Amino acid sequence: MTLLCSIALGAQPIVLKTSTMYDGKGGTRHNAIVVIEGSKITRVGGAAPAGAITYDLTKFTVTPGWIDTHAHIVYHFDNNNRSSGRGEPQMQAAWHIAENAVATLDAGFTTIQSPGSFEDKDLRDAIARGLMPGPRILTSLQPLDDHTGDAQKMREVVRERKQQGADFIKVFASKSIREGGQITLTQEQIDATCGEARSLGLRTIVHAHSAESAKASTLAGCTSIEHGAYITDEVFDLMAQRGTYYDPNIGLVLQNYLENKPKYFGIGNYNEEGFAFMEKGVAIVLETFKRALKHKDLKIIYGTDATAGAHGQNYREFIVRVRDGGMDPMAALISVTSLSAKSLNLDDQIGSIASGMQADVVAFDGNPLSDVNAASRAVFVMKGGRVYQNLAHGAQHAR
């Protein structure tokens, strides 16, 4: 259970005692301490400073806070147990959204990227101010798509999003997997969107299922390709050459839709045809992921596309990638920590356990690298030096 008032430990240093600790970049430390002052890690190893508040995590496996690069944090089921939409009382929506934020943080995800909704901005800022618990949030606000307009209009809207406070730009360059995933934008529109964003210092992530849309986005210099169910080996090679990130979303989003079919059915393209496509899609995206792993230089980051019903289960992506996709467990851990941080241009702040980094630390009951299901058992969660969850028996702090 997350503490609704997180434990603020003031000026006293904090020490985390560990037996097995993964630093997020492929390194392993045994029987080392992590020293934290304020929101940052000041030292790994050595002796504990005098007067430190100590948490004994030696019975658990310690990693950096996990990162979800694609989670729709405000999407939720309403009081009628349906995917939320127009007409829901604002206060009811706010509490459901707060519940999503708490569940996500409880699961060990200390940073997420939400692509996105205008409501994300207020949630992002409230969490950043410490008004409520939740993961650190980056948001695109409302995404761009084929209804936005021509190339010039795309540029204008990118500038508008920047002024509105967006952290990055999200653009739809293809239809959904429920509709076959065909390309929906011209090369000129994609070039304009990603080019304008880059000129403003913003990253761009692109919803692109088809090989054609993924190729166009890669050639345009966009930051990452989301989903990519039908990407070919040729396009994967191009992405690897250009340094384009790949965010496959194979372990949670489609499964969550299918598990919650009655709560979505009849809304938009959530119909029998759409759900039939999603059932087939589970195998399609898994096979595409397996092919992607063969491209050794391809940078595969960790996003889930979590929507209503999925928040707090973000770890399922890790389990499916390793158990079913055959991904090396350490590579999967690097993906969900330091590599995803790098894709956000935040690798100098989050994603690893090292001196000078934000003190985002998670402990698991078990070792996710040897028991993949341990990813579902986060028992200690610290974000920015504050303890938000401590279910770890024996890890109570002592002076």
Image (cartoon, helix red, strand yellow):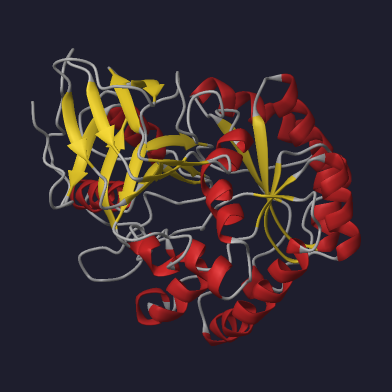
22 vs 136, nearest the viewer:
22
Choose between 377 and 48: the one closer to the eye.
48
344 shown above or below 8: below
Q: Nearer the viewer, residue 209 or 57?
A: 57
The answer to whether residue 23 is visible is: yes
The image position of residue 242, as x and y in percent, is 85, 40
Front-most of residues 167 and 243:
243
Residue sticking out furthest to the right: 234
**Quarter of the figure with residue 387:** top left
Image quadrant containing the C terminus: top left
x and y percentages locating residue 227 in the rendered image? 65, 60
Q: Residue at x 31, y 41 (%)?
A: 18
Q: How many marks?
A: 0
**Residue at point 57%, 66% (across, down):** 321
Asked if 29 appears above or below 87 in the picture, the reply is above
Q: Residue at x 35, y 57 (%)?
A: 86
Q: Is residue 152 above or below residue 21?
A: above
Residue shown at the point (30%, 60%) measured from the top left: 377
Residue 378 vs residue 136: left or right? left
User: Would residue 239 appear left or right of 245 to someone viewing this image?
Assistant: right
Residue extending farthest left: 399
Residue 183 image point, x, y percent = 79, 60
Residue 186 visible here: no
Provide residue 286's location: percent of width, then percent of height: 65, 74
